[in-house]
Image (cartoon, rainbow, N blue to C red):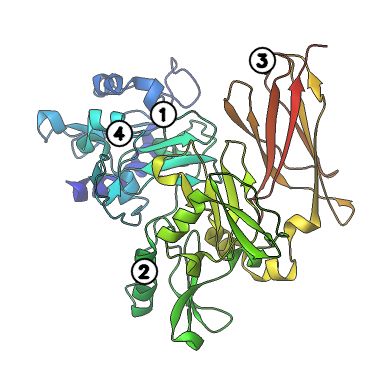
């Protein structure tokens, strides 16, 4: 059946080109259509527009099978199947986008279901178990962090799930599979218009097998997904890129597989050691004369479970608190993050430095030693003291070499007095090096502190953040 659906899907865009040109007059917005009577009960069973979004194409047929695009996917009705299996989502994630994530090893004493080589994200299990693989498809990836879109994601064959970083645990949405697949052939406007890239296709070379065996040894999630086949690097060594690390074969040391020191290659510079902070959740790594780096126990445990300091290296920065009450810290070869509200599998995870290295290369970072050093960021609020319910304005100004720096992208994370986190993406800095945003009104008792953090994004150092706060005060 999968092969049939794959064959049918190849011709769907052609069909929609001819049948999606005249939206219904009673459609709710431009580019939407009434849900076909064929799918109406099925659509309502999955909570209709609240979960799936509106229909964005008319229903159409191919070889006696009926299809219709909704924002969340491609509905399929096959009358040739049994009554309980006639309705489903087309498995476009696997057949069209070729998503085939790294297989996760099953975990002992784990209550979470394990299907098709992947653990099902605990926050989507209730919805998934209510409808099943026959309708939604099998998982084709584990849950992952998408820093570019500021959300957690898991892909299944027919639908995808996500939660924004700033959303409370359990606030799950469906990814716009239907909008991505229909693309320009549907007139519905979807801001998130870029489908996911295909998974890395193994070339099955002996060199590739060596690298993949090493990442299996290091443990799932440490390396991240493979990004490209092994290649000869500029230093003459074999090198293979993964999301979080770059591995190379060192012929001078018995052909051992070693990690590249990505933080320094990407301009994340070592910080001066500091004094020990006494706390149960911290360890102290001394480098000399009573100075060193305070290391969260969570990070120490993660490192010991994933190859030890041989692969992570030793701390080069002090830990930094994050706006979600988590923290981050960089080591010689990786940067780690802890996020208490992340999916269970992603509470502690490496930052995707390997993907940044692939995108930007090392030469730029080497010739321009530190983006964060060269770039000056000023952050301030219009009102250090502000009445409850009033609108605050956050300002950002960027300069480099005493000149305004335009096009700098930042994300703003705001922690309200009630504990709710909100994320805002600011416009890039203008020709004067400035950008600003007006926040939604925030209510709180007199004296309450509003914490916020401005983080650089779209650069070689996405970990660089600037934390400030202001006070709610009735004058």
**Separation (CA) of disc 4 from disc 1:** 10 Å
Q: Earlier in the sequence, mark 3 or mark 1?
A: 1
Name the foreground residue: 32 vs 419: 419
Residue at label 3?
443
Quadrant assignment for the C terminus: top right
Give SS at disc 2: helix
As drawn, 112 above or below 201: above
Q: Earlier in the sequence, mark 1 or mark 2?
A: 1
Q: Residues within 10 Å of mark 2 (few under 14, many from 20)?
A: some
Spot occupied by residue 278 in the image (x, y as percentages of width and height) = 62, 46
**Separation (CA) of disc 2 from disc 3:** 51 Å
Residue at label 2?
212
Instruction: Please give left or right for residue 109 compared with residue 282 in the image.
Output: left
**Separation (CA) of disc 4 from disc 2:** 30 Å
Residue at label 4?
125
**Separation (CA) of disc 4 from disc 3:** 34 Å
Instruction: Please give left or right for residue 387 compared with residue 112 in the image.
Output: right
Q: Residues within 10 Å of mark 4 (few under 14, many from 20)?
A: some
């Amino acid at each position: 059946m999968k092969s049939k659906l794959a064959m049918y899907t190849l011709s769907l865009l052609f069909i929609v080109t001819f049948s999606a040109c005249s939206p219904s007059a009673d459609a709710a917005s431009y580019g939407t259509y009434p849900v076909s009577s064929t799918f109406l009960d099925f659509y309502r069973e999955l909570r209709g527009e609240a979960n799936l979004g509106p229909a964005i194409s008319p229903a159409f047929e191919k070889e006696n099978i009926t299809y219709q695009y909704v924002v969340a996917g491609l509905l399929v009705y096959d009358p040739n199947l049994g009554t309980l299996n006639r309705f489903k989502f087309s498995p476009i994630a696997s057949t069209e986008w070729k998503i085939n994530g790294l297989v996760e090893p099953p975990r002992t004493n784990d209550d979470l279901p394990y299907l098709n080589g992947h653990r099902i994200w605990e926050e989507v299990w209730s919805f998934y178990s209510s409808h099943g693989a026959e309708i939604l498809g099998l998982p084709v990836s584990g849950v992952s962090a998408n820093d570019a879109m500021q959300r957690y994601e898991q892909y299944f064959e027919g639908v995808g799930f996500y939660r924004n970083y700033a959303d409370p645990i359990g606030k799950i949405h469906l990814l716009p599979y239907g909008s991505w697949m229909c693309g320009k052939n549907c007139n519905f406007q979807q801001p998130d218009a870029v489908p996911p890239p295909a998974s890395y296709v193994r070339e099955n070379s002996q060199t590739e097998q060596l690298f993949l065996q090493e990442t299996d040894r290091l443990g799932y999630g440490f390396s991240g997904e493979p990004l490209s086949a092994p290649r000869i690097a500029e230093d003459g060594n074999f090198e293979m890129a993964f999301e979080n690390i770059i591995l190379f074969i060192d012929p001078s040391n018995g052909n051992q597989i070693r990690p590249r020191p990505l933080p320094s290659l990407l301009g994340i510079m070592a910080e001066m050691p500091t004094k020990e902070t006494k706390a149960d959740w911290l360890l102290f790594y001394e480098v000399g004369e009573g100075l060193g780096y305070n290391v969260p126990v969570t990070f120490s445990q993660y490192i010991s479970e994933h190859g030890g300091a041989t692969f992570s290296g030793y701390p080069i920065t002090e830990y930094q608190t994050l706006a979600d009450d988590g923290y981050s810290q960089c080591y010689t070869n990786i940067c780690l993050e802890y996020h208490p509200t992340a999916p269970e599998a992603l509470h502690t995870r490496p930052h995707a430095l390997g993907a940044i290295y692939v995108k930007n290369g090392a030469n730029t970072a080497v010739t321009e030693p530190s983006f964060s050093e060269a770039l000056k960021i000023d952050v301030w609020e219009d009102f250090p003291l502000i009445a409850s319910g009033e609108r605050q304005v956050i300002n950002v100004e960027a300069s480099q070499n005493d000149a305004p720096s335009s096009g700098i992208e930042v994300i703003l994370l705001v922690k309200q007095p009630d504990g709710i986190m909100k994320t805002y993406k600011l416009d890039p800095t203008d020709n004067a090096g400035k950008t600003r945003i007006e926040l939604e009104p925030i209510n709180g008792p007199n004296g309450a502190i509003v914490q916020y953090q401005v983080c650089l994004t779209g650069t070689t150092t996405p970990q660089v953040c600037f934390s400030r706060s202001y006070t709610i005060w009735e004058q």
